[in-house]
């Protein structure tokens, strides 16, 4: 997403950021499909009794909890990435406005 150039400036490639978010969103989509499968297994399993049914219930509950926690972490990561990009866009805009208003004859169009 970002790298530091030779002057120590942080540069954010918005195209790369969009690709990162797209990949993370793809993972979330897959996780949702897995959760649907887990729910289906649990629904089928609910018609059974015995130690095997109990073991399946335990396993599906554990898997659902792990998936839900991971989904939350990924969603928070996406939100954080978006917040960072928005923050740096705002900083860039303020700097550009400051430079343009300084009257030095140089204008920026970025």
Image (cartoon, rainbow, N blue to C red):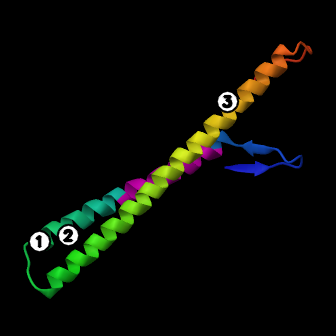
Residue 16, percent from left and from top = 64, 46
Instruction: Give SS at disc 3.
Output: helix
Query: In this rendering, which labeled residue sits more in front, label 3 or label 1?
Result: 3
User: Measuring 41% from the left and 57% from the top, which residue is drawn there?
Assistant: 71
What residue span does the magenta drawing correspond to? Answer: 16-31
Q: Is residue 21 magenta?
A: yes
Packing grade of label 2 (10 A; few <14, some 14-19, many >=20) is: some
Looking at the image, residue 45 sits to the left or right of residue 14; the answer is: left
- Which badge, 2 or 1, comes first in the chain's sequence? 2
Residue at the spot of label 2: 41
**Magenta part mainly helix, strand or loop?**
helix
User: Measuring 32% from the left and 63% from the top, which residue is drawn there?
Assistant: 34
Using the image, tell me which numbered label, if any, was put on residue 90.
Answer: 3
Residue 103, percent from left and from top = 89, 12
Say which quarter of the image contains residue 17. top right
Packing grade of label 3 (10 A; few <14, some 14-19, many >=20) is: few
Which residue is at the front of the view, 105 or 37?
105
Residue 98, percent from left and from top = 80, 20
User: Measuring 33% from the left and 71% from the top, which residue is drawn there?
Assistant: 63
Which residue is at the front of the view, 80 or 3?
80
Using the image, tell me which numbered label, if any, was put on residue 46.
Answer: 1
Q: Is residue 13 magenta?
A: no
The alpha-carbon separation of the residues under discs 2 and 1 comes to: 9 Å
Packing grade of label 1 (10 A; few <14, some 14-19, many >=20) is: few
Please, is residue 78 above or below residue 27 in the view? Answer: above
């Amino acid at each position: 997403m970002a790298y530091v150039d030779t002057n120590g400036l942080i540069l954010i490639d918005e195209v790369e950021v969009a690709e990162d978010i797209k990949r993370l969103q793809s993972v979330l989509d897959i996780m949702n499909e897995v959760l649907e499968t887990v729910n289906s297994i649990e629904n089928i399993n609910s018609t059974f009794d015995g130690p095997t049914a109990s073991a399946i219930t335990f396993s599906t509950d554990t898997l659902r909890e792990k998936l839900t926690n991971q989904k939350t972490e990924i969603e928070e990561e996406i939100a954080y990435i978006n917040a960072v990009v928005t923050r740096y866009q705002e900083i860039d805009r303020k700097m550009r406005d400051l430079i343009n208003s300084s009257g030095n004859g140089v204008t920026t169009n970025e």
